[in-house]
Amino acid sequence: MILSKYPYLVQQEILHNMEYSDLFLLSFVSKRMKKLIKLSQTKHFKSIGSIVYETDRTVQPCVYIPEEPFNKTIMRIINHRKTKNDFQLNVCGKIINFRLCKEYRSENPYPVASCNSSEKECVIQSIHNYFLKFFGNSVEYHWKDIEHNLNQKVEHYIPIIPQLQNVSFSIDMYLKYQFSDMENLENFFSSSPVFKAIRMWTARSAELFNPESKIYQTECIDIQQLRHTFPDLLRYFQGKQAFIRSCSCGELDLIEFVNKWKSGNGFQKLEYLEMEMICDEVSQTQVLNGIGPKYIDATKQPPTHSVPKLFRWYLSDPNTDPIISHSYVVRETDNRVASVSIQENTLFFGVWDKTEEEFLRMVN
């Protein structure tokens, strides 16, 4: 099929129904073809929420666009293995070997780039720079590092975080029982960009995270921890959203957290916190007595607090759980309001972008 023989509207429709991986390859045919794709698919590309580089300890990223029911794979980047079917493409000045690969879910093959380990970071940077020019800056780019199981010593497991423009980073980590290599772990966080999201499972350690650790700067953290002080998010968290499940956390710790927010001495950026005690229920009376909340009249309907999740490990559940509570607290420094709800073994804390007066005007 010779695409140029068709009218522009027909070309546009044909391109619109092609897979992203095919558009990527087709863009290398000529400068004219690349320009045609970009012009005809401007609206289509702007509708892309994000492009994800997903990798594990092998650092062999799968690049895809998250969609339901299956992600749309654009390409993969793998360790160098030559085949007779390889072909070469000039990607932002870097000659890279490619081949076509087909997955069981996919009807169409997608391109796979191969390179030596020493070249991998350069190859990833070249491909990413091409995406920036091809898909544009309106797309969110995300590096997602998953399934890191860290034993007592982590030097062989520390992931590689490439230096890429306009990319946010997330990581999924499992710190095994009696983890004892905090120095290397802290060095990893200090040398990496601040993460957009961290998902972590922690057991216990002889050492704690440094209060100045960059782990506390991550925007969104989802953690299951044996002890709530490893890491101590209720004291040092500087991000926006935290989803915490802990086996050991008392009412006094929850009271200290809320009162610190009320005084303006911490959690300045916080939007939402969900603290679940896995083993124990929370005494609602003790916590409320300790934080001194204000109350909406029981005959009135309080507003519902819910915000978009900053990062979704899965495509489902795009928003935080709704908080509908008659209890709220006010921050002394700027009169901002936070709804407080305690349900069985979970504290829900949702910060409004409203003063108390603005918040009360939403009450029905």
Image (cartoon, rainbow, N blue to C red):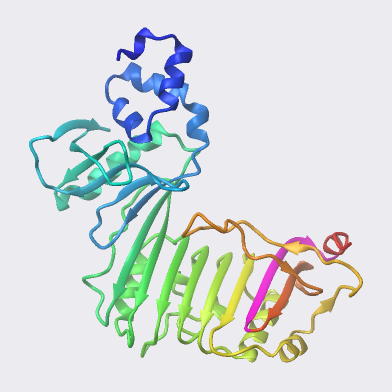
- Measured from the top left, where is residue 253 in percent x and y? 61, 87
Whether 285 is drawn above or below 13: the answer is below
Viewer-proximal residue, 81 or 257? Answer: 81
Q: Residue at x 45, y 12 (%)?
A: 8
Whole-percent x, y for residue 250 in the image: 60, 91
Q: Nearer the viewer, residue 288 or 147?
A: 147
Is residue 118 something one can see in this rendering?
A: yes
Name the quadrant of the C terminus: bottom right
Q: Quadrant of residue 181?
A: bottom left
Residue at screen point 58% across, 56% down = 318
Any part of residue 237 in sight: no
Residue 138 higher or lower than 34, as above or below: below
Q: Quadrant of residue 292?
A: bottom right
Residue 347 in the magenta stretch? The answer is: yes
Q: Indicate the quadrant containing the N terminus: top left, top right, bottom left or bottom right.
A: top left
For residue 268, which quarter of the picture? bottom right
- Residue lying at 27% horizontally and 68% vertically, measured from the top left: 158
- Total marks drawn? 0
Q: Is residue 344 left or right of residue 193?
A: right
Query: Residue 118 in the image: x percent, y percent?
Result: 15, 52
| Left or right of residue 346, residue 178 in this image | left
Q: Which residues are magenta?
A: 345-356
Question: Where does the image place residue 319, in percent across and percent down from the top left?
Answer: 61, 58
Q: Is residue 186 magenta?
A: no
Looking at the image, which residue is at 17% across and 47% down? 119
Q: Magenta stretch mostly in which secondary structure?
A: strand
**In-image side of 18 versus 110 (left or right):** right
